[in-house]
Amino acid sequence: MATIAIVWNWGTSSNINFNPTTDILDFGWFAADQFTISEINGSVVIAIPSNHQTYTLQHTTLSDLHLSNIVAKDSSAIGAWQNALASAPVAAPSSPPPQPPAPPVPVPATGMWSASAIYTAGMTATENGVTYKANWGSGWQASQEVPS
């Protein structure tokens, strides 16, 4: 566990390898109007504009942080963090893997036509006394069924 003290340090840009599960930011007596909180390119950036200073929490988003990561003696600083964390975008849940296509409905070589079946070249189906043969790419070819 590390505690990172946010202090006045004119013109510096600090990159911090922050662990949101254990690390703490200590704002001391900083008030909310003295710093800004933003998320840029997947990292939280704390800026102290009047001091030309930034702290960047590398690979840490606002949605990774909790109030337990923040310590401050000024209640307005805690309020600023409450607002920032409440407005943090919620990480989108990962989408489930795509489902494989349903297997084709098996159709016997010659049988009754089915609207849900997939017919491939050479297969036949009978409807209303007419036998049809699938000719992939050139449509269906009808022939009159001959009674046996």
Image (cartoon, grey):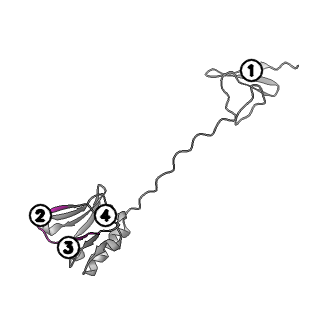
3D distance between C-alphas at marks 4 and 2? 25 Å
Q: Amino acid at mark 4?
A: Asn
Q: Secondary structure at mark 3?
A: helix
Query: Is 134 rendered above or below residue 86?
Result: above
**Number of the front mark, 3 or 1:** 3
Q: Secondary structure at mark 1?
A: strand
Quarter of the picture containing the N terminus is bottom left
Q: Which mark is residue 19?
A: 4
Q: Residues within 10 Å of mark 2 (few under 14, many from 20)?
A: few
Q: Amino acid at mark 1?
A: Ala
Magenta run includes residue 11:
yes
Q: Secondary structure at mark 4?
A: loop
**What residue sits right under mark 2 in the picture?**
11
**What residue sits right under mark 3 in the picture?**
34
- Residue 126 locus on image (x, y percent): 78, 27
3D distance between C-alphas at marks 1 and 4? 71 Å
Quarter of the picture containing the C terminus is top right
| Mark 3 or mark 1: whose residue is earlier in sequence | 3
Going 57% across and 41% down the picture, which residue do you hit?
100
Q: Residues within 10 Å of mark 4 (few under 14, many from 20)?
A: some
Magenta run includes residue 122:
no
